[in-house]
Amino acid sequence: MLHKIFTLLTIVASATSENYNVDCSWPIHSKNLTCGNLLGDRQAVHEEYMEGCRQKWGSKGALRCDSNEEDRLEMSRRQPQSMVNYTETGFKKIKAPEKLWSLLKNYWDANKNDKHKEEWGIGNVYTNNWAAPTYMVSVEDKGLRGGGRFMKNRIWEAARPTIEEWTGMKLQATSLYGIRVYTEGAILAPHVDRLPLVSSCIINIAQDVEEDWILEVYDRNDRAVNVTMEPGDMVLYESGSLVHGRPFPLKGNFYANVFIHFEPTGEHLHDSEWDTQDDFFPPYIVPDSPEIKNWARRNPSGWKKQAPSAAGLSRPKGHVAAANGDLQDIGRLAREDKHLLHKKDENGWQPIHEAARAGNLDVVKLLVEKHGADINSVTNFGDGSSVYNVAVQAFSPDHPVAMYLSSKGAVNIGPEL
Ligand SMILES: *[C@@H]1O[C@H](CO)[C@@H](O)[C@H](O)[C@H]1NC(C)=O
Ligand SMILES: *[C@@H]1O[C@H](CO)[C@@H](O)[C@H](O)[C@H]1NC(C)=O
Ligand SMILES: *[C@@H]1O[C@H](CO)[C@@H](O)[C@H](O)[C@H]1NC(C)=O
C-alpha cells in the first residue's frame, strides 16, 4: 500500500516538472516532432543535422543519409516492443566496480594520445561525425600499450558480473570496441542498439566539458529522462529495448566513454533454470513480435551460443598467420590444411578479416587471388563487418587494402555503432 502511494506521488511530481515523450528532442518514432517549441526549434536542429550528412556524402551518398534515418526510426518503432525485458526500469546508474574502473582508467591513461579518427559508413546518421569527428582508443589494437584480444576479454569479464546481477541472467559477450572520444558539438541520435547488443553498460572514462553532456533515455512509458555521468559512473541499460542517445550537442572539449555489450544466454543467474529454448531464435526476442521476421532474414542460420570468450585466447593458425602478415606460413597452411585459410573463429572472423585489420595488402591479395577467399564475407556475433569495412575501420578508405578491395567491388557492410 505504502509503495502504491509513493508511486502515485512520483507520477504527480514528474508531471509538474519537464515531461515529454518521444519525438520532442529528436525524431524517434516519427520525423515530425510533436511538442512545439518546448525545447526550442528542434526540428530545425534536426534538419541542419541531416543537411550536414547530405553535404558530407555529396551526390554519391546523400540519399543514404535519408534512408539510414528512415531505418533508425523504423528500428526504434519495431525493436523495443519485441524485446524481453529483464529489469523493471531498463536502466540504472551506479559507480563502476573498482576492478573494471582501474582496468579502463589505466588503459586510457596509457593510450589516450594514440586515439585514431573513426571512419563512419556512407550516410551514417548515428552521430554528426561530419561536424564533430569521433576518435577511438581501441582495446584490441595490439599496437597500443596492453591492447589486444586479451585486454578485450579482461574488460568483458570485469563488467559481466555486475550486468548479470542486474539482469538476473547469465550473459555472453557480444561487442566491445574501445573508448570512444566525442568532440565539441557532438550529437548521438537516440536509438536502440542492433541485436545482439542487448544487456549493456556505458562508462564515462574522462571528460573535459563546460556542462554535463546529457544522456537521454526513455523509460518504460516512453518518457524522456536526462541522465548525467561523471568519470567513473556506469549506466547499465537494456540497449536493445531502451531508446538512448545524446540529442543535445556536447559543450566542451571532449567526452570519452566505453560501451560494453552482452546478450542473455537464456540461463538464469541464481537458480540455474533456463528460459524455454527455441531452436532458432534467441531467448530475448518475444515470439511472434515484429522483430522476429526481421531477425530471421538477417540470421538465416539461427542463433548459436558462442564458444566461451576464453577461446579468443588461442587463435586458429590461419588467423595468426594472416594477422602477422606471414606469407610463408600461409603458403604452408595452403598445402597442409587449406581449410584453415577460410575457417571462422568464434566471432565469425576469417583470416581475410585479420589481414584487413592488420593492413597486410600482400596477405589480402594472396588470400583473394590465390586461395579464393570471399572479399564480401561478413563477421558475425556483434561485429558484423565486411572485409572492406574492417579495413576502413582500422585505417581509412585511402589505405591500400581498402583501395584494393574497393577496386574489386567489395561491399561496405558494418556495424552502425
Ligand atoms: C509530417 O508532416 C508533414 C507536413 O506537415 C506531412 O505532410 C506528413 O504526412 C507528416 N508525416 C507524418 C509521418 O506524420
Ligand atoms: C520492453 O521494454 C520496451 C521499452 O520500454 C517496451 O516497449 C516493451 O513492450 C517491453 N517488452 C515487453 C515484453 O513488455
Ligand atoms: C534534459 O536536458 C535538456 C537540456 O538541458 C533540457 O532542455 C530538457 O528539458 C531536459 N529534459 C528532461 C526530461 O529533464
Image: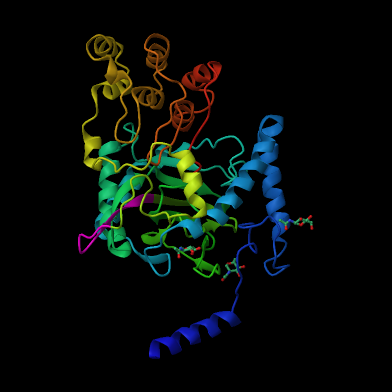
Residues drawn in magenta: 260-274
Rendering quarter of residue 64: top right
Is residue 272 one of those drawn in magenta? yes
Is residue 239 one of those drawn in magenta? no
Q: Please count the marks in the image.
A: 0
Q: Residue 29, how many percent across, how many down?
A: 62, 58
For the N terminus, the image quarter is bottom left
Q: Residue at x 59, y 57 (%)?
A: 247
Rendered image coloring scheme: rainbow
Q: Residue 77, how many percent across, how many down?
A: 57, 56
Rendering quarter of residue 111: top left
293 with respect to 358 (left or right): right
Q: Residue at x 34, y 23 (%)?
A: 351
Q: Residue 47, how many percent across, how many down?
A: 72, 51
User: Is 275 drawn above or below residue 308 in the view shown?
Assistant: below
User: Is 214 drawn above or below residue 301 in the view shown?
Assistant: below
In the image, 266 versus 195, the foreground residue is 266
- The answer to whether residue 163 shows anywhere in this view is yes
Indicate which quadrant contains ligand 1: bottom right
- The answer to whether residue 185 shows anywhere in this view is no
Q: Residue at x 57, y 52 (%)?
A: 189
Q: Residue 188, how many percent across, how many down?
A: 55, 52
User: Is 52 drawn above or below residue 403 in the view shown?
Assistant: below
- Magenta region, mostly helix, strand or loop? strand
Q: Residue at x 69, y 60 (%)?
A: 42
